[in-house]
Image (cartoon, rainbow, N blue to C red):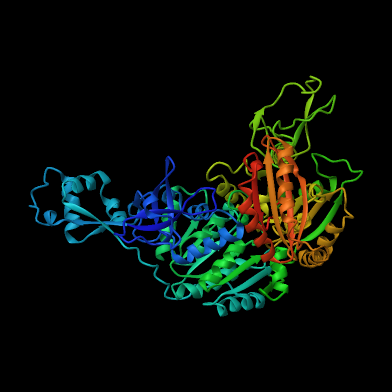
Amino acid sequence: MIVVRVALPVPLRQHFDYLINADPKPQVGCRVLVPFGNRKLIGIIWQIAPTDSFDASKLKAVLSLLDTSPVLPPLLCQLLSFAADYYHYPLGEVLISALPALLREGRNLNDYQPKAYQLTDTGKLLNITALKRAPKQHALWQALQAHQLTESVLLQQHSRSTLKQLLEKQLVEELIVAPIPFTPPETEATGLKLTPSQALAVTAVNHASGRFERLLLEGVTGSGKTEVYLQAIASLLLKQQQVLVIVPEIGLTPQTLARFQARFNVPVLCWHSALTDNERLHCWLQASTGAAAIIIGTRSALFLPFWQLGLIIIDEEHDQSLKQQDGFRYHARDLAIKRAALQHCPILLGSATPSLESLHNALSKRFIHLPLPDRAAGQALPSFELVDLKQQVLQFGLASQTLAQIKQQLTLGLQVMLFLNRRGFAPALSCQECGWLTECQRCSAFTTYHKQSRQLVCHHCGASKAIPRQCGGCGSTQLKPLGQGTEQLEENLQLLFPDIAITRLDRDSTRRKGALHQALEDIHQTGARLIVGTQMLAKGHHFPNVSLVVIVDVDGALYSSDFRAPEQLAQLLTQVAGRAGRGSSGGKVLLQTQYPEHALLQDIIQNGYASFARSALAEREQTRLPPFQHLVLFSAEAHQSIDCQQWLQQVTDFMRQYPALQLLGPIPAPLERRAGKYRWQLQLYSAGRNTVHQALDQLLLQIASWPLSRKVKWQLDVDPTDLT
C-alpha cells in the first residue's frame, strides 16, 4: 500500500491523502473512488507518495482505482493547476469540471471505447450445422468467419440481440479497438482567392506553426476572417495536427461546422452543452486519440485532451460568453493563451470588434496584429443614419422614416433586420390608473410580460407567475404592457406587413431543439423577409440578403454604472450593423435614439469601432482602469443586507495592509436583490498582478475562520467582465 494525494470536488482549498494498492501502479491524473465522510466521491490522483503525508495508519483506503492510464494527461493537469491558482478556485472542482459528465459519474472508460467482435476458439471450431435452427445467429457466425467486425459495421447488418446471444454462448468475444489518428488529406484543400490582407494573415499564422505565438486578427465584418481560419488550418492537417476552434455561442456551431466539413475531408466534430452525455464523451475520446482532426466548440472545449494540437482559434474573442459567470469563473480566451504556451502552438484571436484587453496587447507588441480593413468581396461597409425620436409620432415603436425605408427594401425583395435587445412582449405590465408596475418579489427588478405563454417572468431569477387580473396597488383591472419586447415587435410588424414572412430569433423562439437551425434556414431562403431578434443576431451570422438593419432602441445601453458599458455597446452596434450589405446590394443601418448627439454614437458613426476603441483605451489609461490595472471582484449575497456589508468590510479591513491595492466598496450591487438575497460587492484594483494574487492567497486562508462566512454566500471573480 502506498499513499496518494487526491483532489476531490469539494469547496475546500486542500487535498486529501489515501492509501492505495501499488498494483496496478496508480498514476497522476487517474480517477479513484474514495470514502469522504459518509459519502463516496470520485477524485483525481494529484500526487503519489507525498513526503508530507499524515501517518499512514490513520489514512483510509481508496475504494477502487477507476483508470489504468490518466484521463487528465500531464499537460492538461498543468493547465488546470494554473487555472485553479489564478482564479483561486478549489483544484478538485476545477479538475472534475474538465471531465465529461459520464467520467465524473465514475463510468468505465472502456465501455465507451470503439469495439470489435471476433469468433472465440470455440466459435471457430463450431460445426456448420450447429446454428441451423437460429438463422440470424448462423448468418452472424458466418460473417465473422472471415475476419473480425467493428461494432458499427456489424450492427448495420445484424441486430444487437443476435450478437448478445452469441456472446452468451461464448462463440464470440469482444475486443477494444485502439482508435487511430485521422488520415491527413493527400492534398491541401482549395480555398477562395484571398485579398492581400488575408494572404498576409494566413502567411503569419503558417509562419508561427510549431511555436507559441499570439496573433490578433482584427477584421471588419464581412472581411473573410473565417476564410483565413480555413486556409491556415489546411497546412496543419497535412502534418496530421489537430485544431481547436472556440466559438462563443451554440448558435454559431452548426454553421461553422457545416462550412468546415464542406472544405475538409477529415473528421470535424462539435462540442457544446446541447449534446447528450454520450455524444460529449465520444467527442472527448476522438480528440484524445487524434481520431478527430478539428473540434469546434464553446468555451469548455478548451479542456479537451488533444492528441497533437497544432493551432487554437478563438472566434469573436471579444464576446462575454467566453467568460464563465458562475462557479469556476474562468475566461476561455485567457486560458486558451496559456494552453497554447504549454502546447508550443500558435493561438489566433479573431474579431471585428476586439476587446480592449486584446487590442492593448496588440498595440503593445505582445500580440502580432493582423488587420483586415476591407470586406473580402469588395462591398462597402454599411452606412449609418441616426433617427431622432424626439417630437416624432411612433407607430409600434418605429418612426415614420424608419417604416418608409423598411417598406422600400421589402418592395425590392430584400430582407430587413430589426434588433431589439429585450425578449418577451413587454418589460412590465403597468396600471393605467395608479402607475403600479409588476415587480419580482425576489429581485430588485420588474417581471417581463410574455404574451405567448401568458406568464410574468423574471429574467434574473427565472421566477414566473400567471398574469394578474387586478392591479396590486389599487385593484384596477386596467393593466397594459409598458415598453416593447421582441414578441410585441413581431406581432406589430405582422399587422403592418401581413404578406411578409417574419422570423424571430431570441432565447424563447429557439428553445426547442432544432428551432434555431430551422430559423436560420428560413432566413437564407431568398425573398423579402423581416428578421426580429436580440443579440443572438449579432454574432457571426452571414445573411447576404439583408440590406437594412434597424436598431430599434439604442438608448437603454447608453447610461450605465459599468465602465465596460461603452465598449460593449460599441461592439454590439458594430456587430449588428455588420449583418447588413454582405451580399450584392449595399447596406444601411438606422439607429433610433432620443440622444442623436451622444458622443459614443457620433464616434461610432463618424469614425468606426477601430477609432472608438483606441480613444477608449486612452480614457482607460487616464483613469487607471483595466487593462491598465488588474481588477478582482468580491461579491456577497445573504438574506440580510447587513451581513453582506459587514463581511465585505472584513475583507476591506484585511486588504488595507496592502497599500498597493485600491479598494472600491463595499457597495450594493447594481441589481441589489436577486432570488430573495441582498447583494453587495467590493472591487480591488492593482497595478501589479503578483501583488493582488499574494494578497488573495493570504486572505483565503483567513476567510473560513470568520463566523460571518457561514451566513454569507461569497464569490471571488478574477478579471470580471460583468459588474452587475
Compared with 228, 485 (above or below) is above
Q: Which residue is nearer to you in this view: 74 or 22?
A: 22
Compared with 576, 430 (above or below) is above
Q: Which residue is nearer to you in this view: 452 or 75?
A: 75
Labels in figure, total: 0
Residue 628 lies in what quarter of the image? Answer: bottom right
Q: Which residue is nearer to you in this view: 620 or 658?
A: 658
Q: Which residue is nearer to you in this view: 341 or 241?
A: 341
Q: Is residue 258 among the parts visible in the rendering?
A: no
Residue at 35% of width from left, 63% of height from top?
179
Quadrant for the N terminus in the image: bottom left
On screen, residue 564 versus residue 324, left or right, reads right
Compared with 517, 347 (above or below) is below
Residue 180 lies in what quarter of the image? Answer: bottom left
Residue at 65% of width from left, 44% of height from top?
504
On screen, residue 217 versus residue 420, left or right, reads left
Residue 598 lies in what quarter of the image? Answer: bottom right
Residue at 42% of width from left, 49% of height from top?
42
Q: Which residue is situated farthest in the top direction here?
A: 475
Picture coordinates of residue 235 (x, y %)?
Answer: 50, 75
Picture coordinates of residue 87 (x, y %)?
Answer: 61, 57
On screen, residue 110 versus residue 468, left or right, reads left
Q: Is residue 537 among the parts visible in the rendering?
A: yes
Picture coordinates of residue 440 (x, y %)?
Answer: 71, 32
Picture coordinates of residue 228 (x, y %)?
Answer: 59, 71
